[in-house]
Image (tube, coloured by chain):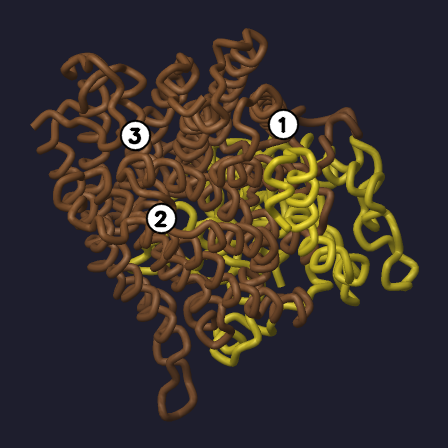
Chain colours: A yellow, B brown
Amino acid sequence: MFHWFEQRPFFFSVLLFIFVAFAGIVEVIPDFAKQSRPTVGTKPYSLLELAGRHVYIKDSCNACHSQLIRPFKSETDRYGMYSLSGEYAYDRPFLWGSKRTGPDLMRVGNYRTTDWHENHMLEPASVVPGSIMPAYPHMFTNMADLDTAYAEAFTVKTVFNTPYDIDLDGDGKVDVELGDYETAIAKAKEEAKAIAADMKNQAVKDAVANGQVPQIVALIAYLNSLK
Amino acid sequence: MQDGARIEYDYSIAKLFTFATILFGIIGLTLGVVLAFQLAFPELNHLAGEYGTFSRLRPLHTNGVAFGFTLSGIFATWYYVGQRVLKVSLKESPFLLAIGKLHFIVYFITILLAVVTLFAGITTSKEYAELEWPLDILIVVFWVLWGIGIFGLIGIRRERTLYISIWYYIACFIAVAMLHLFNSLEVPTMLVSGYGSWIHSVSMYAGSNDALVQWWYGHNAVAFVFTTPIIAMIYYFLPKESGQNVYSYKLSILAFWGLMFVYLWAGGHHLVYSTVPDWMQTMGSVMSVVLILPSWGSAINMLLTMKGEWQQLQTNTLIKFMVLASTFYMLSTIEGPIQSIKSVNAIAHFTDWIPGHVHDGVLGWVVFMIMAALFHMAPRMYGREIYSKSLLDTQFWLQTTGIVLYFTSMWIAGITQGMMWRAYDEYGSLVYSFIDTVTVLHPYYTIRAVGGLLYLIGFFMFAYNMYKTATAGRVLDKEPVNASPVAA
């Protein structure tokens, strides 16, 4: 029966496409809406956290650290409660990773502090002797891109209805405020000051005091939000 | 028209892509060796500031090998094999020749831009789909150009029936087009908001959905970049080089359509124990095991093609390359399903056994087959004898040793780490801290790096041998029919 197709390239290609596409149609499409429903308490990232997430992605932290806790006792003992689908509802892209050269970070905000992250990024072996992680001193001097973070937050709010500026839990207050560009940037800089207060690096503190946001500050805001 | 020698084929595009294959092969493999040494000796991360860290180089390595080296190899062999099995020369169609050249130019520019953007840290973070949206569009452009090339040539063919290799090239074209289009759907944020970087985009899918689409893509990029086009090559080059017919036509059909139907299901095995629905994880596991049948079907068909002619292994080094490639294909396609079984996956996932698996597939199967194909093409394209047999043999053994060091060390490293992560003492506490499970891997990382280095040296021998063949090999008076001539 397939012999007939081998002399008719058009029909061959159509049949091939059906064979290849079939699995995707059955496997990927169902449950698509259900999968993206947020768990109670899941909130979108603040502007500063989003800028930190961009730093995380830019330096491919996900190449070595996963953000997916599997439902095994050895993992829940080590990292905390196993992952639920709805916890990732505002993750675009997902950052599960595929290789743990370093430990999982899904709930790293529960057990590491700003101070620890600061030391870790500057000299990993100072907090974890034997660590093979590279140091990231450039994060202390390069500035985070708040404009692009704002662009992303605005885009997901507009296009995907990500709940910024909305009262999610019904307590009468907006949970994650975005607002317009000026408000959002000003608020991110306020958040940055709170992070910098817990840091030691004087250059970073000075930069934040001058209204700048070094990448390390944004990255730590993001890592602290992982809970 | 039975005698192919009467058509004068045009190799100009095949030669361009051959050059690209060697160039990107050197870049991609060198980066790989650097990464391997960085894991064993972390100080090496700091040789080039923020641009030299493992995290920046890792996507460059994977993209360099997958889309620089392998795609070039696929295109090089297509522009050679396509004309021959369809019995039509590109010279007969100035249009298709021009499209082919444009294909090369757009492709080459895309890869160069990919290198620049990845160095700068511009990435979507999705594995094997890291490039941002303007480059995604360029990929669509050169892919469409290739499609015009394929179907244009098929349209003016003299051979009515499409040879098996053509099936696999078409499969590569159609499936990658579909995967790339759906996985790369993203919204450029500046176009919506008017702020920020113009190159930045946000994925159309969120969380678990994004993961599902990404691994549906990611696994099948392996299927349709690292598998089907390489099978296309071996189905053409092994019978040609050995002078033997493909063992079984029926087996070819069964293996081809089986592979097409089953492969796409297997992506779910990347998500075992994740938050995607259980039935998808189970389907991924089960279908991965079923996938052994079509994979081994092809591999057995290749090996049995040598039936009664095994003495050629002693006389023809290119046959040795191709038989080793088939063998590693079998190894890799039994290893993958084993890793997909839930209980094994629980140990193997997130460990070095996974890069071990990828590399025995890519180093043993993909790179070996592409090198053999280019060696077979060289005497026909340049009308010259392969420059050196001793270099060819040395390369073979050096690289084989390299692969063995690579995968054995990574198997041990992966299983060791997987077992240490889950070890409990008699009081019910975890025995090892995470860093214990990292420091224990140092010897294996060192062995892997040495294995990679041997392989890289072998690749330089290949590049040198190809260069000398093209420029200084003894000129042939007529095209060889089967075994490629090699200077003693």
Nearest to the observer: residue B324 or residue A195:
B324
User: Tag 1, which chain?
Assistant: B
Q: Residue furthest bottom?
A: B426
Name the residue nearer the viewer: B134 or A224.
B134
Q: CA distance from mark 3 to mark 1?
A: 25 Å
Residue that badge 1 annotates: B140
Residue B318: x %, y % from top left: 23, 38
Q: Are marks 2 and 3 in contact (CB under 8 Å)?
A: no
Label 2 belongs to which residue?
Answer: A123
Identify the residue position indicated by label 3 in the image: B26
Quarter of the image for residue B202 reads: top right
- Label 2 marks a residue whose chain is A
Task: Name the outermost residue toward the top.
Answer: B94
Residue A18 rendering spot, x and y as whole percentages? 70, 48
Work out whether B285 lies above or below A117: below
Q: State the residue in front, B140 or B479.
A: B479
Q: Quadrant of residue B416?
A: bottom left
- Mark 1, mark 2: which one is toward the viewer? 1
Name the kind of residue labelled 3 in the image: Ile
Residue type, numbered disc 2 = Glu
